Image (cartoon, helix red, strand yellow):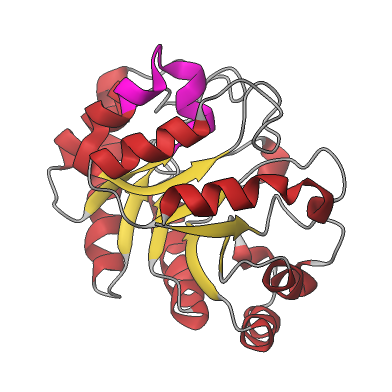
Amino acid sequence: MYLAANLTMLFQEYPMEERFRAAAAAGFKYVEIQFPHFHPLEELQRAREAADVEVVLINVPAGNPERGEVGLAALPGREKDFREAVELCATYARGLGARKVNVLAGKPPVDLSADRIWRTLTENLRFAVERLGEEGLMVLTEPINPVDVPGVFLNCLEAGLEALERVAHPGLYLQFDLYHMGITEPDLLKAIARAGRAIGHVQFADHPGRHEPGSGSLDLLGALAALREVGYDDAIAAEYRPLGRTEDGLHWMADFEAAIR
C-alpha cells in the first residue's frame, strides 16, 4: 500500500496547479483529483510533470454542482450526458496518466421507481467499465453516506456490492472510503472483510468532521490492517478537510507509512 493526496480536498491554500508541488514537498509521490475537468488539461499536465508525482485516480464528471448534482450514473434520462462525461474523463485520464476512474451514482429524482434507477445505473456502469477499460483504466463506483449527501442512491456498502453484482463485470470495483463506511456501517473492520476483493481503491478521513486522522474516533490504523488481511495492496488516499493549514496537519503520515510498509 502507498499514500496519496487528494488535491481537491488538501492543499487548498494553493491554486490547483500549485497543489502538485505542495503535495510532493510534503512527501506524497501519488495524488488524485476529484474533477480535473474544471481545469485546463495542459496546465495540470505541466504541474504534474514539474512535481514528478503520479495521478492515481480521477472521477467521471458528476453533473452541474450549481444544481446540486453529485453524479450522473443513476439518473434516468441523462444517459447522453453520462456518456459524454465518460468520454471527457477518458481524455483527462489519458492526459494525466491516471490508472483509476470513479463513477458516482448521484441523487436520482425521488419520484422514480427503484427498478428504473437500478436499470439506468447498471447500464451506465456497464458502459463505463467497457469504454474506460479500452483505455486500460480500472473503474470503480462509490457508496457515499446519506448524512452528508441526502438522497444519494448508493448509500451504504450493501448498495455498492449490489451494484457490482448487477453489473457482473470483472472490471468494476468499489471505491471504499473509510469515512463514508465509518458512518454507514456498524463495524468498519467487518465492512472491510465483507467487501474483500471488491475493494479497488481506498480513501480516508476521520469521523466526525471529515478531518485529518486523529481528529475523530475512527480506528484508521486498524482499518489498514484489515485491508491488508483482505489482500488490498494499492493506494490509500487522504481525502479530508484539513482543520488548518494542510502541512500543519500531516502528523499522521509517519504512523500510516509505518502501518502500510
Would you identify the image quadrant in which residue 174 lies?
top left
Residue at the far top in the pictured view: 186
- Position of 12 with respect to 138 (left or right) is right
Q: How many marks?
A: 0
Residue at (54, 40) in percent of width and height: 204
In which quadrant of the rendered image does the C terminus lie?
bottom left
Residue at (33, 40) in percent of width and height: 227
Q: In the displayed structure, would residue 148 be above or below residue 78?
A: above
Q: Which residues are magenta?
A: 177-191
Residue sitting nearer the eye, 212 or 10: 212
Q: In the displayed structure, would residue 153 be above or below residue 36?
A: above
Residue 122 in view here: yes
Residue sitting nearer the eye, 44 or 189: 189
Residue at (46, 72) in percent of width and height: 93
Residue 178 on the magenta span = yes
Q: In the displayed structure, would residue 156 be above or below residue 1?
A: above
Q: In the displayed structure, would residue 257 be above or below residue 119?
A: below
Residue 62 in view here: no
Instruction: Give how far across and how far down residue 73 sits, in percent.
Output: 39, 43
Residue sitting nearer the eye, 39 or 26: 26
In which quadrant of the rendered image does the N terminus lie?
bottom left
Would you identify the image quadrant in which residue 242 lies?
top right
Instruction: Give how far across and how far down residue 137 sits, in percent.
Output: 32, 68
Specify the principal SS of the magenta part. helix
- Position of 48 with respect to 143 (left or right) is right
Instruction: Give how far across and how far down residue 27 sits, in percent.
Output: 65, 67
- Position of 247 with respect to 240 (left or right) is right
Instruction: Give how far across and how far down residue 13 sits, in percent.
Output: 87, 58
Residue 11 on the magenta span = no
Residue sitting nearer the eye, 200 or 232: 232
